[in-house]
DNA sequence: ACAGGTTGGAAAAACGATTGGGCAACACGA
DNA sequence: TCGTGTTGCCCAATCGTTTTTCCAACCTGT
């Protein structure tokens, strides 16, 4: 390729005008009186020389970088995270922005150092993301740089945030089971006290209420949010007399545990037992037999929303919608419910 | 925080010296004669004012950015990808570099546009990554920007690349089964003609050879690299007379299918059938019962190697090792082999 | 012919760093 | 006292843009 990059000066020389004019023409600065013939000459020169303006120079002049950084605890290693990153990525790229990624690994000293490094590079805004929906406090180092929370919420209501609508998600899952005629529906919940746990339980209860079904405390069992936790909880629920005919599981991993329990007890899914998961981890949901009906987390949409919101905020435009949004978790029907 | 960022000028004024001196002191430029007392004054001023040099300005001056970009087809959505990104990330950050991420979604026009955008931003080097090990040709748009291939290999041997050692991985998996006394070992391979397919088969054969076991074509069955493909292939292998007592599966998803087949046929794992997977997808391997013995892809290490290699290349230092490396895939023993 | 308005474009100052060259001030030997 | 080094620091150019200000030339009406 070319030895030295072609700069605006080269274009100006080639077109026989000043750099000022080149800049005005190429940026289509409104209110500038430049004849069409000159404009044409400039554009042709730029094209012939393969001119591409240096963002570095522009950023220096404009004191901004058109760069966003996503700071996350450990996010890049989970499959959900991928969707979130992708959503953010594509939204950024669509708007002509670039997105950086930084993992902090829960090390707040390292986190602060990385944030400082990013601020040196004039990053215009931060996406502060967590691996799963939780409450956070923004690190000091962010200072006054615009920030949006992703899959997290802060007690400071002024910073925009986007999280899944856990309550509605729990309701959606439960309603799917009720719709199929189930009246004794077990709920295998997470043992950790996080928003997802509380929200999904609330949704579960709300759906039961709406259907006129009584809430039965014995039908909800907590477990560690892994296959093993689901397995144990399901064992307990399914070996009781008057066992539930359907299970709503906190996540797909736990649902996988429920499958194992059902197999142990000789229960067929979905004939003898219906199961609904949560998360839509395709690796699991499509791998189980029968394939697992579940509820999807809107990670892609959350990533996109966060970036769009962040950009409007940076550009000083007013945020139109609410600052703290909850996105819907849609049902993904497969074959584990009957 | 501060209203306007503090620049080198502010430090110079505060310390009563020129910006030149500040730059020299702070960058510890060798061969500059500046008294210790002046140095001290400068450093104290910088500290008091909370000065952080603007990378944008420095980059403009030095015509480089200390930024790397990872271009990948669809990588961010798979869990493997996460490890690869993390490895690259941490290596970059350790060396004081920043890493950008770009997904192209197999759209080569979009890819070219993104690459141009990144070059405008003076990105110093590219990591060209693929979701799974395959052969690629480098896009034109990259031009003469230093590049390293990640989980991919090009026919152009001059561009450094790092991929998993598929042959040795296949051998490792097979040897684990041989070590447990198995002599009839089925191999469920991928149906797509990719390096992983050929490599793992070669490893499988080599291990058999070394153990003095004859290769039996009927013991290897190809399938689509998903649960369903594994299920069907396993059905075929396991329902044959003189069925294999152990299965080496192309990946963990297919191994999951093999579990389903075993369950259908009433075969217990590992008592009646041993299974080894590939990929170490923890979602699956830890979710199955019994937990799945598998072979891990060295994604983290690959990411780190690629970044380190890219940086040494950019800095013009000579690459010490070979330019095209294959990293080992270690065995991750769990409970599916007996 | 001349004031006053419009048109089309250029000069130059930023933005915040790095760096080659230069220049006083002092020391020292002859 | 002069010449020659050495020390310690600063000037100014430079990277590639954007943007404010300014100006010459042309037009128009009287």
Image: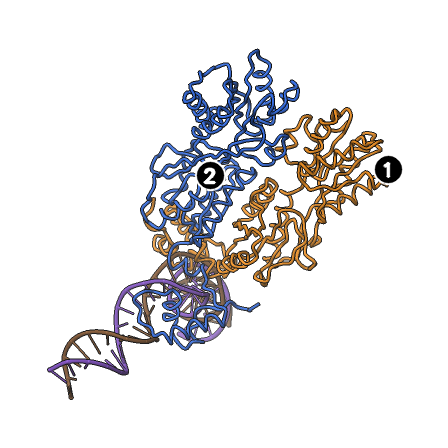
Chain colours: A blue, B orange, C brown, D purple
Q: Position of residue C9 (x, y in %)?
A: 34, 75
> Which residue is denoted by mark 1 in the rendering?
B211
Chain letter behind tag 1: B
**Looking at the image, which residue sits at the far top?**
A241
Q: Dividing the image into 4 quarters, which one contains the C terminus of chain B?
A: top right
The part of the image, by quadrant, that contains residue B241 is: top right
| Viewer-proximal residue among A332 and B147 | A332
Q: Is residue D23 left or right of residue A53?
A: left
- Residue A113 x %, y %: 47, 42
Q: In this figure, which residue is indicated by the disc labeled 2?
A: A129
Q: How dense is the environment of label 2, judged by Cα within 10 Å: few (below 14), some, or many (20 and up)? A: many
Residue A262 falls in which quadrant of the image? top right
Say if residue B31 shows up in the picture. no
* SS at circle 2: strand
Q: Nearer the viewer, residue A203 or A337?
A: A337
Give the quarter of the figure containing the N terminus of chain B: top left
What separation in Å lies between label 2 and label 1 (alpha carbons)?
Answer: 51 Å
Residue B249: image x %, image y %? 73, 37
Circles 2 and 1: CB atoms closer than 8 Å: no
């Amino acid at each position: 390729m070319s030895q030295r990059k072609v700069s605006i000066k080269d274009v100006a020389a080639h077109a026989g005008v000043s750099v000022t004019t080149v800049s005005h023409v190429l940026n289509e600065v409104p209110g500038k009186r430049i004849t069409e013939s000159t404009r044409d000459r400039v554009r042709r020169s730029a094209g012939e020389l393969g001119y591409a303006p240096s963002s570095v120079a522009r950023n220096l002049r404009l004191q901004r970088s058109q760069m966003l950084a996503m700071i996350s605890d450990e996010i890049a290693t989970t499959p959900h995270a991928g969707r979130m990153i992708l959503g953010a990525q594509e939204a950024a790229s669509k708007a002509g922005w670039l997105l950086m990624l930084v993992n902090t690994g829960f090390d707040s000293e390292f986190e602060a150092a990385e944030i400082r490094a990013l601020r040196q590079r004039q990053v215009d805004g931060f996406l502060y993301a967590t691996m799963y929906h939780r409450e956070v406090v923004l690190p000091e180092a962010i200072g006054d740089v615009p920030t949006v929370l992703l899959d997290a919420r802060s007690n400071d209501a002024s910073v925009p945030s986007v999280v899944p609508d856990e309550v509605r998600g729990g309701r959606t899952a439960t309603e799917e089971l009720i719709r199929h005629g189930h009246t004794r529906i077990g709920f295998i919940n997470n043992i950790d006290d996080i928003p997802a746990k509380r929200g999904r339980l609330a949704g579960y209860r709300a759906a039961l209420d709406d259907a006129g079904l009584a809430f039965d405390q014995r039908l909800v069992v907590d477990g560690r949010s892994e296959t093993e936790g689901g397995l144990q909880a399901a064992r307990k629920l399914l070996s009781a007399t008057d066992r539930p005919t359907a299970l709503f599981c906190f996540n797909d991993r736990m649902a996988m545990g429920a499958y194992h329990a059902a197999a142990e007890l000789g229960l067929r899914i979905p004939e003898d037992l219906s199961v609904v998961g949560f998360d839509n981890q395709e690796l699991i949901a499509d791998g189980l037999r029968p394939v697992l009906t579940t509820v999807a987390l809107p990670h892609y949409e959350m990533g996109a929303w966060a970036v769009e919101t962040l950009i409007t905020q940076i550009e000083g435009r007013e945020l139109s919608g609410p600052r703290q949004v909850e996105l819907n978790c849609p049902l993904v029907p497969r074959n584990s419910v009957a």
